[in-house]
Image: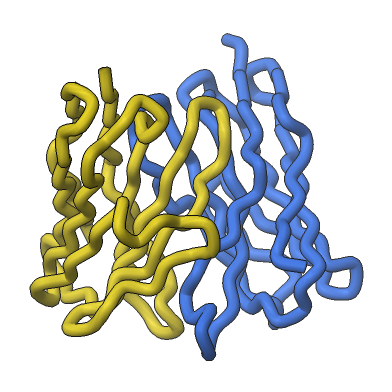
Amino acid sequence: GAVVSQHPSRVICKSGTSVKIECRSLDFQATTMFWYRQFPKQSLMLMATSNEGSKATYEQGVEKDKFLINHASLTLSTLTVTSAHPEDSSFYICSAPTGMSNQPQHFGDGTRLSIL
Amino acid sequence: QQQVKQSPQSLIVQKGGIPIINCAYENTAFDYFPWYQQFPGKGPALLIAIRPDVSEKKEGRFTISFNKSAKQFSLHIMDSQPGDSATYFCAASKGGGTSYGKLTFGQGTILTVHP
């Protein structure tokens, strides 16, 4: 079945560091990918839509200069958390759709980001 | 209008029981309703999904019931097992326009199945 790979699975770094998270579709092409953020015991909140070959679309309240998204190819999207601070600590998850109307979506296993 | 409301927040059943998780939505433009299962430290995994032109869909032990007029849908897990213990999320999306493919998630239900 469709597989979405996310890397790294866990990052621990100091405040002020920039962190890059990769999301790859392994056996299919994805012109669109989605990035979510999930706090402990909470639901997934959509941050942005990553579009291959064009700018990402950010949800209201998400700082585009803080969360840089690059969709460089049909199988890779990256999320860079710039100058990360402790409040950016969270579980970041990407998804990629495989069907019509961008559904169904398959999710990566997430990246646990901890900023000290 | 974009919200999807999910209940209960948590649910405990005995092995073999049939937990039922409910979701309600307001936006009649939603046309795709998936359910996801999430284990701690993992991303959500698609369980089953339904579109509003059918009232029920069954895949293995998982069944979605859909009531279009009430704008509600639910997940039933038959013969539940301890391995089903996880967090379950309902979601909804609509095709077309700027919301193409965006999933709106419910709040999640933590299911515990006791042996």
Image position, residue B19 (x, y; %): 71, 33
Which one of the lettered chains is coloured yellow? A
Work out whether residue A1 can be spotted: no
Residue A28: quarter of image: bottom left
Q: Quadrant of the C terminus of chain A?
A: top left
Chain B pictured colour = blue
Q: Position of residue B41 (x, y in %)?
A: 35, 27
Any part of residue B69 in sight? yes
The percent coordinates of residue B106 (x first, y second) are 65, 49
Q: In the picture shown, does residue A12 fall above or below A68?
A: above
Depth check: B59 or B68 in front? B68
**Which residue lies at the image location 20% right of the left edge and 28% below the top edge?**
A10
Residue at (9%, 74%) from the top-left corner? Answer: A73
Left or right: B21 as drawn, with respect to A91: right
In the drawing, does residue A112 fall left or right of residue A103?
left
Q: Nearer the viewer, residue A26 or A45?
A: A45
Figure disc tally: 0
| In this rendering, position of residue A80 left or right of residue A57 | left
- Assign the N terminus of chain A to one quadrant of the image: bottom left
Q: Nearer the viewer, residue B53 or B103?
A: B103
